[in-house]
Image (cartoon, rainbow, N blue to C red):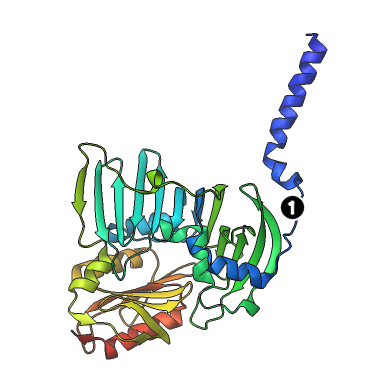
Amino acid sequence: MRPVLRWGVAGLATALLALTPYAGRLYRVSDPDVSTAALVAAVRASAGTAYSATVEVDGHVGLPIADHFSDLADLFGGTTRLRVWWRDETDWRVDRLLDTGEVDLFHLGQVTTEWDYERGDARYSRDPEIRLPRDSDLLPPEVARRALDDAAAGQVTSLPARRIAGVDAAGLRVPVTGVQSSLRHVDLWVDPATGVTLAARVYGVSSQPAVSTTFTTYSSAIPGTAATHFRPAPGVTRFADRIVDIADAADEFAPVKAPASLAGLSRTSGSAAALYGHGLTRLLAIPLPYRDADELAAQLTSSGATVVHGQELLRAGPLGVLVTRGVGNVYVHWLLAGTVTDAALRQAARELTRTAVHR
């Protein structure tokens, strides 16, 4: 090959490589011919729709909390890579991909098994009535269905289509209108052929999404049970976990009963620990042992929490966290956390002191 031709080929190759990140922008995305109401209905009905995907979750909610909540802080405050096989809402698998291995969740019926590659063990449990968020809750289809829980179809508006994982995905904007909510809207991009949401962005008052979750690859083929059913290798230790996390433990053992409503939000699950609200506007109330409450309060204070009447309140984007002191009818400390305003958190704290009772 002549030198001038050789350099010409090299230059062309370099140019193509340089343009690769912009290839999606050069592709003309067409808005799918489907109504907003039809898309909303398809998303709501998509829990039983099968798919396989890889997902990237970008969280911008910095939670300065450790110990019982370290996994939660990682999930909402950084970049998480997931791999998912979804047959339906009763049969799925979600892997969290780590630099040193992975942690896999297998869900079948009412039982979830967690396989930890580094520890080399598997822990299984029946799904509790109340628990902390986990990886599967931040899959785009799951975020979308929760966002539409209490939204009227007439409130949802369309957004320009985007090319996501090889699909021209139709856009939707779901407003969040509750006065207690610290969220403003959720933007979704949906595969119009299946109703599966390929990307979701959750916004508070900032122009930057608090959480963004996006498919990076996607297939609508039904995954086989070989992928979703846990089959341990010989020698793998299996444990039965009766208690899955601090919320489940508090609901099981704390000697209190949370009220039926807090700050105008109805209780949707739990008894001692309780979850309030609908959609993505949620408030979690967990009774804490004194030592745990004091340690958490110290972490919040060192991270800049405001202290009013001895209660530490920290705002991290749309997420608020408050620790109460034991006063009122039942001398119990409480952790309050959720996508609600500071005013709603303080109102909930006041109501807990009056309406929580022994059980």
**Rendering coords of residue 57 (x, y %):** 49, 53
Q: Within the image, what quadrant is residue 278 found in?
A: bottom left
* Residue 173 picture location, percent across and down: 63, 69
Whether residue 157 is visible here, answered yes or no, is no
Residue 200 in the image, given as x and y percentages of width and height: 56, 61
Residue at image position (35%, 55%) is 107
User: Which residue sits at x=28%, y=90%?
Assistant: 355
Q: Is residue 230 above or below residue 194?
A: above
Residue 84 at what x, y percent from top left? 45, 49
Residue at 25% x, 58% y is 125
8 on left or right of 255: right
Location of residue 344 with respect to 136 vertically, above or below: below
Residue 300: image quadrant is: bottom left
189 on left or right of 241: right
> Split into 4 quadrants, where in the image is the C terminus?
bottom left
* Left or right, 237 with reference to 144: left
Quarter of the image with the N terminus in it: top right
Q: Report which residue position mark 1 lands on.
A: 29
- Please tell me whether residue 47 is drawn above or below residue 278 in the rendered image: above
Give the secondary structure at mark 1. Answer: loop
Amino acid type indicated by mark 1: Val
**Of the pair 87 and 264, the residue shown nearer to us:** 87
